[in-house]
Image (cartoon, helix red, strand yellow):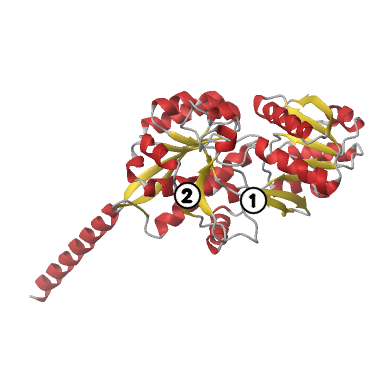
Amino acid sequence: MNKRLFLKTAIAGILSVGLFSGVALAANETLKIGFVGVTSGPAAAWGISNQRSMETRAAWINETGGYKIGDKTYDIEIVAFDDQKDPKRAIAGMEKMAQEGIHYVVGPNVDDGAAAVRPVAEQNGIMYFPYAFPKSLYEAPASNAVLGMVANYQSGPAIYKYMKDEKGVKKVAFVAANESDPLSQRTGGVAAAKALGLEVVSDSVTYQVDTTDFTPVLLPVVRSKPDLLVLSGVSPANAPQLIRSARELGYTGLISTETAQDALVLKEGAGDLANGFISVGGASTPEIATDMMREFVERYTKMFGEYNDESNTKVYALEYILETLKADPAGITDAAAFKKIMDTFEAPNPYMKGDAVLKYVGMSSFGQKRQVAVPLVVNVYKDGAFETLFVAEVD
């Protein structure tokens, strides 16, 4: 009797645990969010911070029970694709997202890739959040792309004005890689500088991305004696090399860029020579960061062993997607519903102190709301870390 009772009790317990586990596993549906961007090569830091930010936030959401949208709760799965900064691979990545039924994708990180995937995104009802600046991506009739950061033609004027007013800058020189993305940023920067009354003393010097000796590239630029040297669209890998070469040639003026950078890469590649380098930073500073922002940084660091300041900006894309879907769950399978609510969408900003809200902006730049509202934080590099120079916002 005791043996039969034991077996009956044990079997009942196993069935009970199995049923309970089945319920737990089936409780949350899975919502897939894609990432198509560069995670290898000279610009890898841009895409790596994207992917890691998404994976950190998704793991956090899943750990705490999932994300409630309408009457369902979802676990978030990040589906990532390295486009290697190649437009053809970016297209393949977006096609992969379409095949998996994914309607929301973060990336690509550069102009060519973001432009290349537009037809695939529009044909398959995919909303995508590029970190690329061509206005044609965000102006009508385009409507599926949402700029995930502050553009160079928005940050550039703010930086140059600060330099003019606070640092006495009068003469500016521009250097860019011989690629469409940085060349486009240089064009915008030159126009912004001239609009502010600054003298542009050099705007035609370019270099190949695989350059190892920047001395002959920078020599004529340094000879033009600018107060400010702008490294248009510079990748995190090339920035320290250019800075080092400029300083070794005797240049003592200011150096800046409108692209985000990696403090660790600057420290390893240029050391103290990078002190004073000005760049666009992540959309947070210690003064405005909430407890949730600080926890995000802690979780990211624990998950990957390091942190990239640019992820202060990259954390926002996934949050915007999920919060907008929460506002209208129909958007989960219908991009048209997502777009319809963007004009009036607002939600509390969990990463910024005060009464800041998540909302879509871009009317001034694009004539429609196709940009996430993140603070424009401009940093200066000093002794291995970034310090906040100033904070602004865009419309």
Measured along the vertical axis of the image, is residue 78 above or below residue 5?
A: above
Which amino acid, by three-letter code, is at mark 1? Answer: Asp
Q: Earlier in the sequence, mark 2 or mark 1?
A: 1
Location of the N terminus (image quadrant): bottom left
Measured along the vertical axis of the image, is residue 341 above or below residue 178?
A: below
Residue 3 or residue 161, whichever sits in front:
161
Image location of residue 8, percent across then percent down: 12, 68
Answer with left or right where residue 298 lies relative to residue 99.
right
Measured along the vertical axis of the image, is residue 30 above or below residue 288?
A: above
Q: Residues within 10 Å of mark 2 (few under 14, many from 20)?
A: some
Q: Which residue is mark 2?
A: 319
Image location of residue 279, percent across then percent down: 72, 44
Q: Using the image, tell me which numbered label, if any, was put on residue 309.
A: 1
Residue furthest toward the left?
1
Image location of residue 377, percent across then percent down: 66, 49
Q: Quadrant of residue 253?
A: top right
Q: Is residue 212 visible?
A: no
Judging from the image, what secondary structure is the residue with disc 1 in?
Answer: loop
Q: Using the image, tell me which numbered label, if any, was put on residue 201.
A: none
Q: Quadrant of residue 239?
A: top right
Q: Quadrant of residue 227?
A: top right
